Amino acid sequence: MDYEKFYSDNAKKMRSSEIRELLELSQQPDVISFAGGLPNPDTFPLHQINEIVSMILENEGSKALQYGPTPGLKEFRKQLADFIGKDGIDVSMDDILITSGSQQALDIVGKIFINEGDVIITGLPTYLGGINAFLAYRAKLIGIPLDDNGMRVDLLEEKINEIEKEGKKVKLIYTIPTFQNPAGVEMSEDRRKRMLEIAKEHDILILEDDPYGKLRFEGNAIKPIKAFDNNEQVIYMATFSKILSPGLRLAYVAAPTEIAKKMMIAKQSMDLCTSTFTQLIAYYYIKYGYIDKQIPKIIEMYRKKRDIMLSALEKFFPPGCKWTQPRGGMFLWVELPEYINTVEMFPEAVSSKVAYINGRAFYVNGDGYNTMRLNFTNARDDEIEEGIKRLADVIKRRIK
Ligand code: PMP
Ligand code: G9A
């Protein structure tokens, strides 16, 4: 049977994710994987979660195993408003929506805002899961290059003016300002403020995706864009995937109240509510102060892994290659000489038992052939140097 004719126009635009496809490969024991953005499993607080789960089942079992309200448990939303309040984000519980991962929040944003052809601005490169979520609603994605200080807001403004001259409008800017996925870079405070001004002048919403903000290895914290927003223009989202566990599928959105409500209605028909059980686990994890002790341990582990990877790159990679020096997060970004195509090189890397994600996957304009993303958090310390050595050998065979 030909199923194609049955699919909706939206479904025809859906793309499979390179990251998801490589997940199985990454889990093969002899492949050293720098591909998926997996947290290190040694950071999962098994003991504390075990204690919390027993306590929940004993005291609140019937609530934990029951359906819950669509926006999320009240006590949890209130707690999260306080939690992000410490980062300078001033919102009330009514502005908070709990979602099943921030991936769901990206999909909800797509669902409530995007009509076919609507223009969304993203980083060049940007998170593949964001690209795919927006493409599924038939958005037109336009990328703005990044440098070491994040998105080039000068180019952003130029591009918006250009688009407006053509009689079109930009609806949304999707940005990951802190330890960006995939590039690992951090947007400066000046640029954050300038982006807000530009969004205000041109009547555009900002979607700020912040999974990595708590994973800072050095340098002073820069407030989220949402903290500078006095015009209710920023939708902020963060996740427990990188500071507790991705398996719990737990994230939250802080949005202008009206948008939070619209997102909640969209969520009603997606999953009714996020798991009440995992919400309670995270609630007690924060309430008992475990999270405050755990985050510094994660940071310490990941800082060391980043350092091992940076030294190995320095030691083994041939001249002509460049990479970012992330001050936090989970990824660094490598640029090879222009004549090397990382998509074509990938099978050779896998034969050499090392994996990465090709950079082109993160480019909305089809560029990035000579780039790759390396995750430094999932591999064991002793594997990182060996993996980079294997990768360097693959690259050296292509160096002219
Ligand atoms: N946004 C970004 C920028 C990410 O890197 C990720 C996960 N890698 C997500 C969203 C989705 O995360 P989750 O659904 O686990 O919260
Ligand atoms: O496994 C996933 O799809 C989440 C990780 C995302 C990433 O590697 O950027």
Image: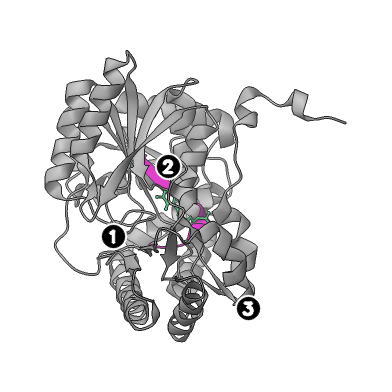
N-terminal of the pair, mark 2 or mark 1, is: 2
Q: Which mark is residue 98?
A: 2
Q: Residue 283 falls in which quadrant of the image?
A: bottom left
N-terminal of the pair, mark 3 or mark 2, is: 3
- Most foreground residue, 160 or 134: 160
Query: Would you place residue 80 above or below residue 135 in this image?
Result: below
Please name the residue shown 16% across and 50% down the image. Answer: 188
**Mark 2 or 1, closer to the camera:** 1
**Structural crowding at the residue carrying mark 2, measured as other residues with C-alpha within 10 Å and reported as few (<14), some (14–19) or many (≥20):** many
How many tags in the picture? Answer: 3
- Most foreground residue, 62 or 51: 51
Identify the residue position indicated by label 3 in the image: 29
Q: Which mark is residue 214?
A: 1
Q: Secondary structure at mark 3?
A: loop
Please name the residue shown 22% across and 22% down the image. Answer: 202
**Structural crowding at the residue carrying mark 1, measured as other residues with C-alpha within 10 Å and reported as few (<14), some (14–19) or many (≥20):** many
N-terminal of the pair, mark 1 or mark 3, is: 3
x and y, in percent, of residue 243 in the image: 38, 62
x and y, in percent, of residue 263 in the image: 43, 29
Q: CA distance from mark 3 to mark 2?
A: 35 Å
x and y, in percent, of residue 99 in the image: 46, 42
